[in-house]
Image (tube, grey):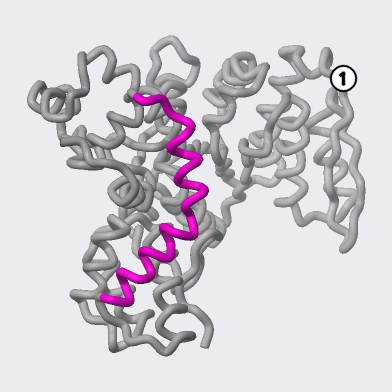
Amino acid sequence: MKNPFVFGKVVQGDLFLNREMEISAITETLLSGQNIICYSPRRYGKTSLMMKVSEKLKEQGNVVFLIDFFRVTSLQDLYNIYASSIAETDRSPLKVFLSIIQDILPTINPKVVIKPPDSPTVEISVPLPVLIKSHSLNELFNSLEQYCKKKKKKGIVIFDEFQELSLINDGALIEKEMRSAFQHHKLVSYAFLGSKQNLLKGIFRDKNRPFYNFGRHFELDVIESVHWIDFINKKMGKECSAKMADDILMITENHPYFTQMFCHYLWEYTKTRSKPLDASAIQNVLLEILERDELLMSDLWERITIAERHLLKAIAAEEPENIYEKSFLLRHSLGTASSVQKALKKLLDLDYIRKYKTGRYVFVNPFFKRWIHSNTIRVS
Protein backbone atom coordinates (compact mmCIF):
# COMPACT_ATOMS: atom_id res chain seq x y z
CA MET A 1 0.00 0.00 0.00
CA LYS A 2 1.31 3.43 -0.96
CA ASN A 3 2.04 5.91 1.81
CA PRO A 4 -0.89 8.39 1.77
CA PHE A 5 1.08 11.29 3.27
CA VAL A 6 3.21 13.44 0.94
CA PHE A 7 5.71 16.17 1.76
CA GLY A 8 8.45 18.05 -0.07
CA LYS A 9 6.54 18.45 -3.34
CA VAL A 10 3.50 20.25 -4.74
CA VAL A 11 0.38 18.67 -3.24
CA GLN A 12 -2.59 18.04 -5.55
CA GLY A 13 -5.88 16.17 -5.66
CA ASP A 14 -7.20 14.61 -2.46
CA LEU A 15 -3.80 15.18 -0.85
CA PHE A 16 -4.47 18.93 -0.81
CA LEU A 17 -6.05 19.94 2.47
CA ASN A 18 -8.61 22.73 2.92
CA ARG A 19 -7.54 26.35 2.09
CA GLU A 20 -10.94 26.77 0.40
CA MET A 21 -11.43 30.29 1.78
CA GLU A 22 -7.97 31.39 0.62
CA ILE A 23 -8.46 29.87 -2.85
CA SER A 24 -11.79 31.64 -3.29
CA ALA A 25 -10.58 35.02 -2.00
CA ILE A 26 -7.35 35.02 -4.04
CA THR A 27 -9.12 33.89 -7.23
CA GLU A 28 -11.82 36.56 -6.93
CA THR A 29 -9.26 39.27 -6.18
CA LEU A 30 -7.14 38.43 -9.22
CA LEU A 31 -10.15 38.16 -11.53
CA SER A 32 -11.31 41.58 -10.38
CA GLY A 33 -8.09 43.05 -11.76
CA GLN A 34 -6.41 43.53 -8.40
CA ASN A 35 -2.98 42.28 -7.37
CA ILE A 36 -2.17 40.14 -4.34
CA ILE A 37 0.80 39.71 -2.03
CA CYS A 38 0.86 36.30 -0.36
CA TYR A 39 3.43 35.42 2.25
CA SER A 40 4.14 32.69 4.77
CA PRO A 41 7.18 30.70 5.89
CA ARG A 42 8.58 28.09 3.52
CA ARG A 43 6.67 24.82 3.33
CA TYR A 44 3.33 26.32 4.29
CA GLY A 45 1.93 25.29 0.91
CA LYS A 46 1.96 28.60 -1.01
CA THR A 47 2.93 26.92 -4.28
CA SER A 48 0.34 24.15 -3.87
CA LEU A 49 -2.28 26.78 -3.03
CA MET A 50 -1.44 28.85 -6.12
CA MET A 51 -1.54 25.75 -8.32
CA LYS A 52 -5.14 25.24 -7.16
CA VAL A 53 -5.84 28.91 -7.89
CA SER A 54 -4.23 28.50 -11.34
CA GLU A 55 -6.48 25.54 -12.12
CA LYS A 56 -9.58 27.61 -11.34
CA LEU A 57 -8.32 30.55 -13.37
CA LYS A 58 -7.49 28.37 -16.39
CA GLU A 59 -10.88 26.66 -16.21
CA GLN A 60 -12.41 30.11 -16.75
CA GLY A 61 -10.31 30.76 -19.87
CA ASN A 62 -7.53 32.87 -18.35
CA VAL A 63 -3.83 32.60 -19.18
CA VAL A 64 -1.54 31.95 -16.20
CA PHE A 65 2.21 32.62 -16.20
CA LEU A 66 4.57 31.38 -13.48
CA ILE A 67 7.88 33.16 -12.91
CA ASP A 68 10.07 31.74 -10.16
CA PHE A 69 12.42 34.35 -8.70
CA PHE A 70 14.26 31.68 -6.75
CA ARG A 71 15.93 30.82 -10.07
CA VAL A 72 16.85 34.43 -10.80
CA THR A 73 20.39 35.53 -9.93
CA SER A 74 20.88 38.23 -12.58
CA LEU A 75 19.08 40.47 -15.02
CA GLN A 76 19.89 38.02 -17.82
CA ASP A 77 18.20 35.24 -15.83
CA LEU A 78 15.11 37.37 -15.45
CA TYR A 79 14.89 38.04 -19.20
CA ASN A 80 15.25 34.35 -19.98
CA ILE A 81 12.67 33.22 -17.43
CA TYR A 82 10.20 35.93 -18.45
CA ALA A 83 10.37 34.98 -22.11
CA SER A 84 10.34 31.28 -21.30
CA SER A 85 7.10 31.71 -19.36
CA ILE A 86 5.41 32.75 -22.60
CA ALA A 87 6.90 29.77 -24.44
CA GLU A 88 5.75 27.35 -21.75
CA THR A 89 2.23 28.81 -21.77
CA ASP A 90 1.66 29.30 -25.49
CA ARG A 91 0.31 26.36 -27.47
CA SER A 92 0.26 28.06 -30.88
CA PRO A 93 1.95 26.63 -33.99
CA LEU A 94 5.64 27.52 -34.11
CA LYS A 95 5.31 30.21 -36.80
CA VAL A 96 2.55 31.96 -34.87
CA PHE A 97 4.53 31.71 -31.65
CA LEU A 98 7.65 33.20 -33.27
CA SER A 99 5.59 36.04 -34.72
CA ILE A 100 4.15 36.85 -31.29
CA ILE A 101 7.60 36.80 -29.62
CA GLN A 102 9.07 39.09 -32.29
CA ASP A 103 6.15 41.52 -31.97
CA ILE A 104 6.22 41.86 -28.19
CA LEU A 105 10.03 41.69 -27.77
CA PRO A 106 11.41 43.39 -30.90
CA THR A 107 14.42 45.02 -29.20
CA ILE A 108 15.48 41.96 -27.23
CA ASN A 109 15.32 39.63 -30.27
CA PRO A 110 15.27 36.32 -28.37
CA LYS A 111 16.83 33.20 -29.78
CA VAL A 112 14.36 30.30 -29.92
CA VAL A 113 15.72 26.76 -29.58
CA ILE A 114 13.47 23.78 -30.32
CA LYS A 115 13.89 20.80 -28.03
CA PRO A 116 11.97 17.51 -28.14
CA PRO A 117 9.09 16.95 -28.06
CA ASP A 118 8.80 20.04 -30.30
CA SER A 119 8.16 22.49 -27.47
CA PRO A 120 9.77 25.92 -27.95
CA THR A 121 12.35 26.89 -25.35
CA VAL A 122 13.47 30.51 -25.29
CA GLU A 123 17.07 31.50 -24.75
CA ILE A 124 18.21 35.11 -24.42
CA SER A 125 21.51 36.42 -25.66
CA VAL A 126 21.68 40.17 -25.08
CA PRO A 127 24.59 42.17 -23.62
CA LEU A 128 23.96 43.64 -20.17
CA PRO A 129 24.40 47.28 -21.34
CA VAL A 130 21.43 46.71 -23.67
CA LEU A 131 19.34 45.02 -20.99
CA ILE A 132 19.62 47.83 -18.44
CA LYS A 133 18.32 50.46 -20.85
CA SER A 134 14.91 51.61 -19.64
CA HIS A 135 13.20 51.01 -22.99
CA SER A 136 14.35 47.37 -22.98
CA LEU A 137 13.10 46.79 -19.43
CA ASN A 138 9.84 48.52 -20.24
CA GLU A 139 9.44 46.28 -23.27
CA LEU A 140 10.07 43.17 -21.19
CA PHE A 141 7.70 44.07 -18.36
CA ASN A 142 4.95 45.02 -20.81
CA SER A 143 5.41 41.81 -22.82
CA LEU A 144 2.80 39.72 -20.99
CA GLU A 145 0.20 42.51 -21.26
CA GLN A 146 0.93 42.69 -25.00
CA TYR A 147 0.71 38.90 -25.26
CA CYS A 148 -2.74 38.91 -23.61
CA LYS A 149 -3.92 41.65 -25.97
CA LYS A 150 -2.96 39.51 -28.96
CA LYS A 151 -4.64 36.45 -27.45
CA LYS A 152 -7.66 38.53 -26.32
CA LYS A 153 -7.54 36.91 -22.91
CA LYS A 154 -7.04 37.99 -19.32
CA GLY A 155 -3.71 36.99 -17.77
CA ILE A 156 -2.41 36.34 -14.29
CA VAL A 157 1.31 36.34 -13.49
CA ILE A 158 2.48 34.47 -10.39
CA PHE A 159 5.87 35.57 -9.08
CA ASP A 160 7.15 32.90 -6.70
CA GLU A 161 9.72 33.85 -4.00
CA PHE A 162 9.50 37.46 -5.17
CA GLN A 163 11.54 38.73 -2.21
CA GLU A 164 14.65 37.35 -3.95
CA LEU A 165 14.45 40.47 -6.14
CA SER A 166 16.06 42.35 -3.24
CA LEU A 167 19.21 40.20 -3.55
CA ILE A 168 19.85 40.83 -7.26
CA ASN A 169 22.45 43.47 -8.16
CA ASP A 170 20.00 45.34 -10.39
CA GLY A 171 17.06 44.70 -8.01
CA ALA A 172 16.27 48.38 -7.37
CA LEU A 173 16.20 49.16 -11.10
CA ILE A 174 14.04 46.11 -11.85
CA GLU A 175 11.62 47.00 -9.05
CA LYS A 176 11.23 50.56 -10.35
CA GLU A 177 10.70 49.53 -13.98
CA MET A 178 8.28 46.75 -13.02
CA ARG A 179 6.03 49.09 -11.08
CA SER A 180 6.20 51.69 -13.84
CA ALA A 181 4.92 49.12 -16.36
CA PHE A 182 2.53 47.09 -14.20
CA GLN A 183 0.49 50.03 -12.94
CA HIS A 184 -0.86 50.63 -16.47
CA HIS A 185 -1.86 47.04 -17.22
CA LYS A 186 -5.55 46.34 -17.81
CA LEU A 187 -5.50 42.67 -18.81
CA VAL A 188 -2.90 41.27 -16.40
CA SER A 189 -3.10 40.88 -12.62
CA TYR A 190 -0.10 39.98 -10.49
CA ALA A 191 0.40 37.62 -7.55
CA PHE A 192 3.58 38.13 -5.54
CA LEU A 193 4.51 35.16 -3.34
CA GLY A 194 7.26 35.05 -0.76
CA SER A 195 8.55 33.13 2.24
CA LYS A 196 10.84 35.74 3.79
CA GLN A 197 8.24 37.87 5.46
CA ASN A 198 10.48 40.80 6.41
CA LEU A 199 11.92 41.17 2.91
CA LEU A 200 8.55 40.89 1.18
CA LYS A 201 6.84 43.32 3.55
CA GLY A 202 9.72 45.71 2.99
CA ILE A 203 8.98 45.75 -0.74
CA PHE A 204 5.23 46.34 -0.39
CA ARG A 205 4.86 48.30 2.87
CA ASP A 206 7.75 50.73 2.69
CA LYS A 207 6.41 54.11 1.53
CA ASN A 208 9.70 54.81 -0.22
CA ARG A 209 9.60 51.66 -2.37
CA PRO A 210 7.92 51.56 -5.84
CA PHE A 211 5.56 48.69 -4.94
CA TYR A 212 4.13 50.38 -1.84
CA ASN A 213 0.41 49.46 -1.46
CA PHE A 214 0.38 47.63 -4.79
CA GLY A 215 -2.06 44.88 -3.82
CA ARG A 216 -4.10 43.04 -1.24
CA HIS A 217 -2.11 41.17 1.40
CA PHE A 218 -2.75 37.50 2.24
CA GLU A 219 -0.81 35.89 5.08
CA LEU A 220 -1.12 32.11 5.18
CA ASP A 221 -1.50 30.59 8.62
CA VAL A 222 -1.33 26.98 9.75
CA ILE A 223 -4.33 24.77 8.95
CA GLU A 224 -6.86 24.47 11.77
CA SER A 225 -6.92 21.27 13.82
CA VAL A 226 -10.49 20.38 12.89
CA HIS A 227 -9.42 19.92 9.25
CA TRP A 228 -6.21 18.11 10.12
CA ILE A 229 -7.84 15.63 12.49
CA ASP A 230 -10.34 14.46 9.89
CA PHE A 231 -7.60 14.28 7.23
CA ILE A 232 -5.18 12.31 9.44
CA ASN A 233 -7.88 9.90 10.63
CA LYS A 234 -8.95 9.06 7.08
CA LYS A 235 -5.42 8.62 5.73
CA MET A 236 -3.95 6.82 8.74
CA GLY A 237 -6.81 4.34 9.16
CA LYS A 238 -9.45 3.43 11.71
CA GLU A 239 -6.86 2.65 14.41
CA CYS A 240 -5.98 6.36 14.54
CA SER A 241 -8.25 8.08 17.05
CA ALA A 242 -9.01 11.78 17.22
CA LYS A 243 -6.86 11.91 20.37
CA MET A 244 -3.87 10.45 18.50
CA ALA A 245 -4.32 12.93 15.66
CA ASP A 246 -4.45 15.74 18.22
CA ASP A 247 -1.24 14.43 19.85
CA ILE A 248 0.47 14.56 16.45
CA LEU A 249 -0.66 18.15 15.95
CA MET A 250 0.68 19.10 19.37
CA ILE A 251 4.10 18.04 18.10
CA THR A 252 3.89 19.56 14.59
CA GLU A 253 1.91 22.64 15.69
CA ASN A 254 -0.37 22.20 12.65
CA HIS A 255 2.44 23.13 10.26
CA PRO A 256 1.43 21.77 6.80
CA TYR A 257 4.85 20.39 5.78
CA PHE A 258 5.90 19.00 9.15
CA THR A 259 2.49 17.44 9.82
CA GLN A 260 2.59 15.61 6.49
CA MET A 261 6.21 14.61 7.16
CA PHE A 262 5.51 13.31 10.66
CA CYS A 263 2.47 11.34 9.50
CA HIS A 264 4.47 9.92 6.58
CA TYR A 265 7.10 8.51 8.94
CA LEU A 266 4.51 7.38 11.47
CA TRP A 267 2.65 5.48 8.74
CA GLU A 268 5.93 3.85 7.65
CA TYR A 269 6.82 3.01 11.26
CA THR A 270 3.52 1.25 11.96
CA LYS A 271 2.96 -0.40 8.57
CA THR A 272 6.45 -1.64 7.67
CA ARG A 273 7.43 -2.64 11.20
CA SER A 274 4.03 -3.99 12.15
CA LYS A 275 3.93 -1.69 15.18
CA PRO A 276 0.66 -0.65 16.84
CA LEU A 277 -0.41 2.94 16.30
CA ASP A 278 -0.32 4.30 19.82
CA ALA A 279 1.28 6.99 21.99
CA SER A 280 4.52 4.99 22.13
CA ALA A 281 4.75 4.90 18.32
CA ILE A 282 4.21 8.66 18.13
CA GLN A 283 7.02 9.34 20.62
CA ASN A 284 9.37 6.88 18.91
CA VAL A 285 8.85 8.55 15.53
CA LEU A 286 9.53 11.96 17.10
CA LEU A 287 12.79 10.67 18.56
CA GLU A 288 13.80 9.14 15.22
CA ILE A 289 13.18 12.46 13.43
CA LEU A 290 15.23 14.39 15.98
CA GLU A 291 18.07 11.86 15.76
CA ARG A 292 17.99 11.89 11.95
CA ASP A 293 18.09 15.71 11.83
CA GLU A 294 20.73 16.09 14.56
CA LEU A 295 23.36 17.50 12.16
CA LEU A 296 20.89 19.95 10.64
CA MET A 297 19.72 21.18 14.03
CA SER A 298 23.28 21.47 15.34
CA ASP A 299 24.25 23.49 12.27
CA LEU A 300 21.32 25.89 12.81
CA TRP A 301 22.39 26.29 16.45
CA GLU A 302 26.04 26.94 15.61
CA ARG A 303 25.20 29.69 13.11
CA ILE A 304 23.93 32.07 15.78
CA THR A 305 25.60 33.99 18.61
CA ILE A 306 25.30 33.28 22.32
CA ALA A 307 22.85 36.18 22.74
CA GLU A 308 20.71 34.84 19.88
CA ARG A 309 20.78 31.32 21.35
CA HIS A 310 19.75 32.67 24.73
CA LEU A 311 16.76 34.48 23.21
CA LEU A 312 15.86 31.43 21.12
CA LYS A 313 15.80 29.25 24.25
CA ALA A 314 13.55 31.77 25.98
CA ILE A 315 11.13 31.78 23.02
CA ALA A 316 11.20 27.97 22.96
CA ALA A 317 10.26 27.98 26.64
CA GLU A 318 7.09 30.04 26.30
CA GLU A 319 6.64 31.82 22.90
CA PRO A 320 5.63 35.16 24.45
CA GLU A 321 2.90 37.51 23.25
CA ASN A 322 5.12 40.49 24.09
CA ILE A 323 8.81 39.74 23.78
CA TYR A 324 9.77 43.07 25.35
CA GLU A 325 7.63 42.64 28.44
CA LYS A 326 9.76 43.39 31.51
CA SER A 327 8.78 40.20 33.34
CA PHE A 328 9.77 38.06 30.32
CA LEU A 329 13.15 39.79 30.02
CA LEU A 330 13.83 39.39 33.74
CA ARG A 331 12.55 35.81 33.89
CA HIS A 332 15.01 34.73 31.22
CA SER A 333 17.86 37.14 32.04
CA LEU A 334 17.82 38.56 28.53
CA GLY A 335 19.29 41.96 29.30
CA THR A 336 18.14 45.22 27.73
CA ALA A 337 15.34 45.63 25.21
CA SER A 338 17.84 47.01 22.65
CA SER A 339 20.03 43.88 22.84
CA VAL A 340 16.93 41.67 22.51
CA GLN A 341 15.80 43.70 19.50
CA LYS A 342 19.12 43.08 17.73
CA ALA A 343 19.04 39.34 18.41
CA LEU A 344 15.36 39.15 17.42
CA LYS A 345 16.01 40.80 14.05
CA LYS A 346 18.71 38.24 13.26
CA LEU A 347 16.47 35.29 14.19
CA LEU A 348 13.67 36.70 12.02
CA ASP A 349 16.02 37.32 9.09
CA LEU A 350 17.30 33.74 9.34
CA ASP A 351 13.72 32.41 9.36
CA TYR A 352 14.25 30.65 12.69
CA ILE A 353 11.13 32.29 14.07
CA ARG A 354 8.16 34.23 12.75
CA LYS A 355 5.72 36.71 14.22
CA TYR A 356 2.02 35.89 14.28
CA LYS A 357 -0.64 38.54 13.74
CA THR A 358 -1.28 38.44 17.51
CA GLY A 359 2.32 39.50 18.14
CA ARG A 360 3.45 36.10 19.39
CA TYR A 361 6.81 34.79 18.16
CA VAL A 362 6.88 31.10 17.19
CA PHE A 363 9.36 28.69 15.63
CA VAL A 364 9.17 28.17 11.89
CA ASN A 365 10.36 24.58 12.41
CA PRO A 366 8.55 23.01 15.40
CA PHE A 367 11.11 20.19 15.51
CA PHE A 368 13.89 22.71 16.07
CA LYS A 369 12.07 23.85 19.20
CA ARG A 370 11.80 20.21 20.32
CA TRP A 371 15.51 19.75 19.66
CA ILE A 372 16.34 22.78 21.80
CA HIS A 373 14.20 21.39 24.62
CA SER A 374 16.01 18.05 24.36
CA ASN A 375 19.59 19.23 23.92
CA THR A 376 20.08 22.47 25.84
CA ILE A 377 19.64 23.56 29.41
CA ARG A 378 16.34 25.41 29.64
CA VAL A 379 16.39 29.03 30.65
CA SER A 380 15.08 29.35 34.20
Residue 216 lies, with reference to residue 288, above or below; the image says above
> Three-letter amino acid code at disc 1?
Pro
Quadrant of the image containing the C terminus: top left
Crowdedness near tag 1: few (<14), some (14–19) or many (≥20) residues, C-alpha within 10 Å: few
- Is residue 251 rendered to the left or right of residue 331? right
Label 1: which secondary element? loop
Residue 50 in view here: yes
79 or 102, nearer to the observer = 79
194 or 245, nearer to the observer = 245
162 or 135, nearer to the observer = 162
Q: Is residue 305 magenta?
A: yes
Residue 352 lies, with reference to residue 235, above or below; the image says above
Residue 25 in view here: no
Q: Quadrant of residue 337?
A: top left
Q: Magenta residues?
A: 280-306
**Where residue 266 sits: x, y (%)?**
40, 74
Q: Residue at x 76, y 19 (%)?
A: 136
